[in-house]
Amino acid sequence: MKTFFVAILFVLLGFVFLSCSDQSLSPVAPIDQQGSLKKAVITNFTYIDYPIAEPSGGEITLTPGGKWQVKKIKVVEKFASSDPLFDGIMEHYLSLTVDAVTGEGPCHGNWTLTPTDPTKTGGGVWEGTYEGYRSKSSVSGEWTLPLKAEAHGKGGTINGMQSFSTVTLTVRADGPTTLPTSWIGVGEGFYKSH
């Protein structure tokens, strides 16, 4: 039995010595690590947004269950930001389902922001999505709609950048329904670049 263990020990030592080398191999050469060592640069920004044209297109339906369904209404807004990469005109397609009586319900959409000064972005634009839930405020005819938005830079010098923001809209419904007639948003966010 001792001979068996001694034989196994010699075999294992043989494998160790055969696999040793004077040249050590690095799993990743230092030149290969340069791309992964770059850190993302985070830039914060603030903004306000508000419609600058009448909404158009899409569909508005009052369901038998007493809900307003709004699908893909085109809205053009001014996006006034502290950062020139986010100061511009936003075109988005709004969808929401709100209770016909309370005016509360979910909202979502997709958007494209074209910066006012294209030289700042090399002609690139931001494309993204947003979602939130509209709730009645304590002011008559007014609702609060906090939204979370995400976007990616497309083209120019912002290509591949990512943006994350939150905005709180104060929504007015001054007509005979709970559908929005105007709003203004105040938000903040950041974008990541390399």
Image (spheres, grey):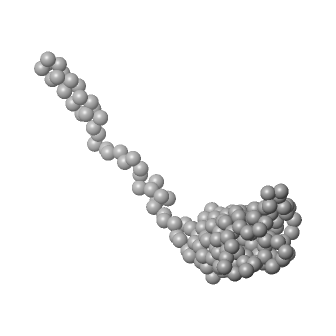
Q: Position of residue 129 (x, y in %)?
A: 69, 63
Specify whether residue 125 is in view. no
Quadrant in which residue 122 is drawn: bottom right
Image: 116 above or below 14 = below
Instruction: Please tell me how many numbered marks the rendered image carries.
Output: 0
Residue at 78 percent across and 76 percent down: it is 173
Relative side of 67 to 87, left or right = right
**Rendered location of residue 84, percent (x, y):** 66, 79
Q: Looking at the picture, tell me which residue is in the foreground, 18 or 140.
A: 140
Picture residue at 82% right of the left edge, 72% below the top: 177
For this rendering, which residue is in front, 134 or 26?
134
Residue 17 x, y percent position in the rendering: 24, 33
Where is the N terminus found, in terms of image quarters? top left
Q: Is residue 126 above or below residue 185?
A: above
Residue visible at 71% across and 67% down in the picture:
104
Q: Nearer the viewer, residue 72 or 36?
A: 72
Which quadrant, please, contains the C terminus?
Answer: bottom right
Please tell me which residue is depicted at 61% across the width and 70% down the height of the picture: 165
Q: Quadrant of residue 169?
A: bottom right
Residue 132: quadrant of the picture: bottom right
> What percent of the width, then of the height, locates residue 182?
78, 78
Viewer-closest of 28 and 49: 49
Can see residue 104? yes
Looking at the image, which residue sits at the far left? Answer: 2
